[in-house]
Amino acid sequence: MACVLLFSRILPFSHRLTRTSICLLSLFLSYVCYCALFPADTVMQKPGDPTPSCQRVLADGAKRRIQKSPSSCVLPLDARPSSDEASRLKTDQRPPSTLHVDTPSPPMGNLKFGNKKLPNAIIVGVKKGGTRAVLEFIRIHPDVRAAGTETHFFDRNYDRGLEWYRGLMPRTLESQLTMEKTPSYFVTKETPHRISAMSRDTKLIVVVRDPVTRAISDYTQTLSKTPDLPSFQDLAFRNQSLGIVDTSWNAIRIGLYALHLENWLRYFPLAQIHFVSGERLITDPAGELARVQDFLGLKRIVTDKHFYFNRTKGFPCLKKPESSGSPRCLGKSKGRTHVQIDRDAIEQLRDFYRPYNVKFYEMVGHDFKWE
């Protein structure tokens, strides 16, 4: 009807037309408009026809219409697809529910390689023995990935669960070992049982040091943070004149290695625990790291070519990596000058630790020569 009204505006004599003529004219104009809007090759096809518009996508992405016969779509000779194109067309004619849609791959820079795994090995102790040095030295091995900070999962955060603990670990490939270090584990009673419950195959590393030197180093570190701390002798002895040592002080208690080891041997065989000498770690870092690599089942890649002795710190450092502008030394707290302790107090502590040291040597089958 819109077409008729328009027509009546254009032709002044249209008012003279009869009603029948107007209806016929309306039908004719409607047909003309329909044909203009819906060309013949896009007219509705049969419901079962899998090619909606009888078009195909060419290799360059443009669409070309093809001639249509009553029963099928016939391609002109210059537009017939190659065998590869025909195969692709056949695939594209599958129902939408089964049609595969290709999605672009993410950029390589966004991919995260490896998975977060529970640790295969843990440095469990001891404080001020050289645990940070062992971790920093072993993690330059390409087959080792380690958590950078102490997790304290098995002694302080155990209620958070293993999945929380796993989340703290670095991503590792299938061929790599996952490690962490928390020195307080060795002296925490519940830790051996908890690690065993996670995995009885976990390898354990304990870095030990002359317990008297270790206690002085422990005190020196605490004093740097708490200047008003009582003297070393006041903390180490209940009665120094009688030689009675205060084993409740943590700095003294940590050095009772034999007692702590007995707790670990209830849950792990001795062969699953490796002991690193804190003294040899300073004088022969490559030798100690060679034994650590053997224990972990790694190829000996970390060797003496990676170390140099820093005379200022009195401690070995890693040589400058090719990708770095400076060598890698441990933090300022490593190699700190110890507080001077009365010689008599040191001798009294050596007498106190001697039977514990001898027992420890017997348990591990190695004399660390702390006398």
Image (tube, rainbow, N blue to C red):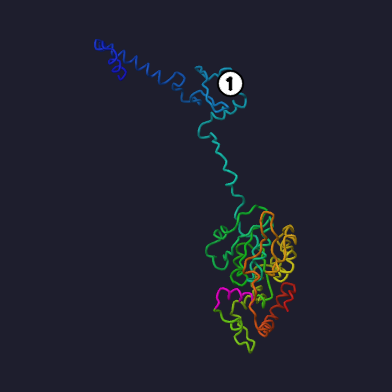
Left or right: where 308 falls relative to 109:
right
Between residue 119 and residue 96, name the one nearer to us: 119
Say if 19 sits above or below 130 in the image.
above
The residue carrying mark 1 is 80
Vertical side of 9 occupied by 180: above or below: below
Query: Percent from the top left, x then y, of residue 182?
Result: 61, 66
**Hey, which quadrant is residue 194 in on the image?**
bottom right
Residue 289: image location, x then y, percent: 72, 63
Instruction: Work out which quarter of the rendered image holds the C terminus and state it.
Output: bottom right
Count of number-bearing discs? 1
Q: Residue furthest left?
A: 16
Q: Residues within 10 Å of mark 1 (few under 14, many from 20)?
A: few
* Residue 356 x %, y %: 68, 79
Rendered view: 79 above or below 137: above
Q: Nearer the viewer, residue 242 or 344?
A: 344
The quarter of the rendered structure image containing the N terminus is top left
With respect to residue 29, does 206 lie above or below? below
Is residue 57 found left or right of 306 in the rendered image? Answer: left
